[in-house]
Image (tube, helix red, strand yellow):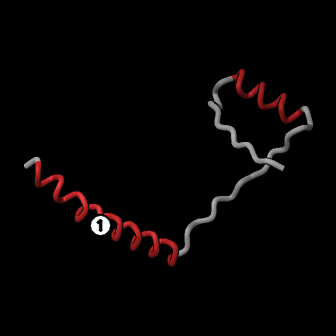
């Protein structure tokens, strides 16, 4: 089974109507998606990766920036 995520303007009557038709056809079902919040360990790992990437990018492009100063 495949998953399709739709975004639409809730105030658009035509969009609401078409969505209702899709759901009423019985070919599609609506599921509630719960977004899992990242754990403290995941946040820490992300911060470490981000900091390492930023430190590396500063070092790798510093010679390019210096050339144009």
Q: Secondary structure at mark 1?
A: helix
The residue pinned by badge 1 equals 56
Q: Residue at x 77, y 31 (%)?
A: 19
Image position, residue 56 (x, y; %): 29, 66
Q: Residue at x 90, y 38 (%)?
A: 27
Q: Residue at x 23, y 57 (%)?
A: 61
Q: In the displayed image of the protein, which residue is found farthest to the top? A: 14
Residue 25 lies left or right of residue 38; in this view the side is right
Residue 23, image quadrant: top right
Image position, residue 45 (x, y; %): 46, 74
Q: Is residue 53 above or below residue 64?
A: below
Residue 4 lies left or right of residue 61; in this view the side is right
Image position, residue 34 (x, y; %): 68, 58
Q: Is residue 42 above or below residue 17?
A: below
Q: Camera-side residue: 5 or 2?
A: 2
Q: In the displayed image of the protein, which residue is found farthest to the right? A: 26
Q: Camera-side residue: 47 or 11?
A: 47
Residue 37 lies left or right of residue 17; in this view the side is left
Q: In the displayed image of the protein, which residue is found farthest to the left? A: 69
Residue 36, image quadrant: bottom right
Q: Residue at x 55, y 68 (%)?
A: 38
Q: Residues within 10 Å of mark 1 (few under 14, many from 20)?
A: few
Q: Is residue 59 above or below residue 69?
A: below
Image position, residue 35 (x, y; %): 64, 59
Residue 40 lies left or right of residue 29; in this view the side is left
């Amino acid at each position: 089974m495949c998953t399709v995520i739709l975004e639409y303007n809730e105030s658009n009557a035509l969009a609401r109507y078409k969505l209702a038709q899709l759901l009423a056809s019985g070919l599609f079902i609506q599921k509630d998606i719960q977004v899992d919040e990242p754990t403290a360990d995941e946040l820490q790992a992300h911060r470490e990766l981000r900091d390492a990437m930023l430190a590396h990018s500063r070092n790798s492009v510093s010679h390019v920036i210096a050339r144009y100063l």
